[in-house]
Image (spheres, rainbow, N blue to C red):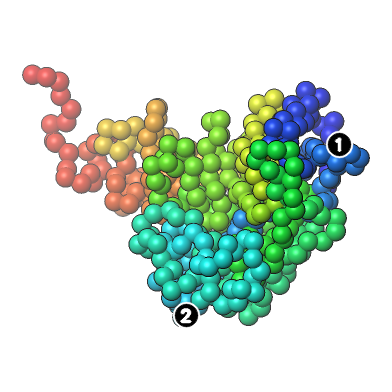
Amino acid sequence: MTTPQEELLPGTRRALSHRIAVAQADGRAPSLVAAVVRGGQTLWHGSRTSVDGHGPDENVQYRIGSITKTFTAVLVLRLRDEGLLDLSDPLEKHLPGTGAGEATIAQLLAHTAGLAAETPGSWWERTPGSLRPELADVLGEQPFRHPVGRLHHYSNPGYTLLGALVEEVRGAPWEEVLRREVLEPLGLHRTSGLPQAPHAGGWAVHPWADVMMPEPAEDLGRMAPAGQLWSTTGDLARFAVFLAEGDDRVLSAESLREMRTPAAPLGAEELASGDAYGLGLQVLHRSGRILAGHSGSLPGFMAALVIGVRDDVAAVVLTNCTSGPRPLTVAADLVRIVAEAEPRIPEPWRPAPEIDPSVLELAGPWYWGTQGCALHLTADGMIELGPLAGAGRRSRFRPNGDGTWTGLDGYYTGEPLRAVRRPDGSLSHLDLGSFVFTRQPYDQSAPVPGGVDPEGWRGLA
């Protein structure tokens, strides 16, 4: 659903239009189309074109390249959530005989499996997929370039393996599973493996002259799960809403939060840029904001989808040239323009309808040794533990339903937290992965490991 553009201020709309106009002109793109999403709806759509007359709208297909990988990752997470596999499983357990089976499913999702970036033989993006009919043709005789799990090395063949995994477990072709389990439930009717009119043609623009030639649009065959899809800004805007909020018909908000969490070790360049990779999603640091999404490119096309979850703003940028504009940068700028010009207005604060007294008792200050921490109860039924002031370890915890909690992020991801009570039922301390948190620094009434000096605190004699 597209809401009236008047919901954005005129100055904001002009800034958005100016940004894509500069991108199209400076990048010498035959056309560029973009959309901005907020509050689950498309608030703005714009396009620029070198062709006189009607420019592309939200229904014109462009090839989206590696944004396809995010769709494939959603299918894999669905299998995990159904209990059909575990992300720590080696690929060999479910898809034997590939020659790359020692890599785990999580490593393939995060590009840490050590596989080659590209396929052996001819440039796969500009040649028919029929040249690589089998997985062995995609991987080659030496599929690994690095030790498994040691570093982040982007691998297109890795996502071919994930697509084959989906086919093996579901017993159906990757695109059929994708349409049934993701595209149809989310209403993405203009997303497809092959182009459907109206669609843009892909072009190569000469680097030193204002002339261009058409690029081939090959069916990638086995490589399809890594980059085959065509889509529109309208469909990708709806997909962005799903990636931010979840949809229990497809994938839960918790599993999507997991996809947005960095899962790959960072190299020096990534550390310097602040960029990371989760499970099928890039995690970017831009203008002080954390963005999640993915870029994509194939000969003749470039694309980007980014989500600023905290700002509740997402942007999609599609263009039909091999190089020139920087869609990921443009999309991040569109998010920034809206977030800065029209900051999100928070919902009115409302008290919780009810709360368990035993949980409320946990709120307030705690001390890990002498370090002061604060435990907050959050509106979504979780708890957050972080420093009383300044920087330090901060994590959110979800309830397990039995009085214990599990860390969701930060240092304590996956770690258990429990409230320990005395025989009379009074609260003694918190045990967080064996760390003891007490109400007073080194509380003598709590079982602090190593004991507490019986003479207590003292000054300099």
Task: State whether residue 328 is above or below residue 187.
Answer: above
Residue pointed to by mark 1:
4
Give the residue type at disc 1.
Pro
Residue 350 in sight here: no
Write down the quadrant of residue 99 in the picture. Answer: bottom left
For the residue labelled by badge 1, is the local secondary structure a helix, a strand or a loop? Answer: loop
At a point 74% along the width and 33% down the height, the residue shown is 25
Mark 2 vs mark 1: give the one in front: 2
Identify the residue at the far right of this view: 53
* Residue found 72% across the figure and 30% down from its top: 22
| Image location (x, y in percent) of residue 185 | 75, 62
Query: Where does the C terminus fall, quadrant-wise?
Result: top left
Residue 440 at x, y = what percent?
30, 33
- Residue at the image position 43 percent from the left and 53 percent from the top: 152
Q: Which residue is mark 2?
A: 96
Asked whether the viewer can see residue 132, the reply is yes
Q: CA distance from mark 2 to mark 1?
A: 52 Å
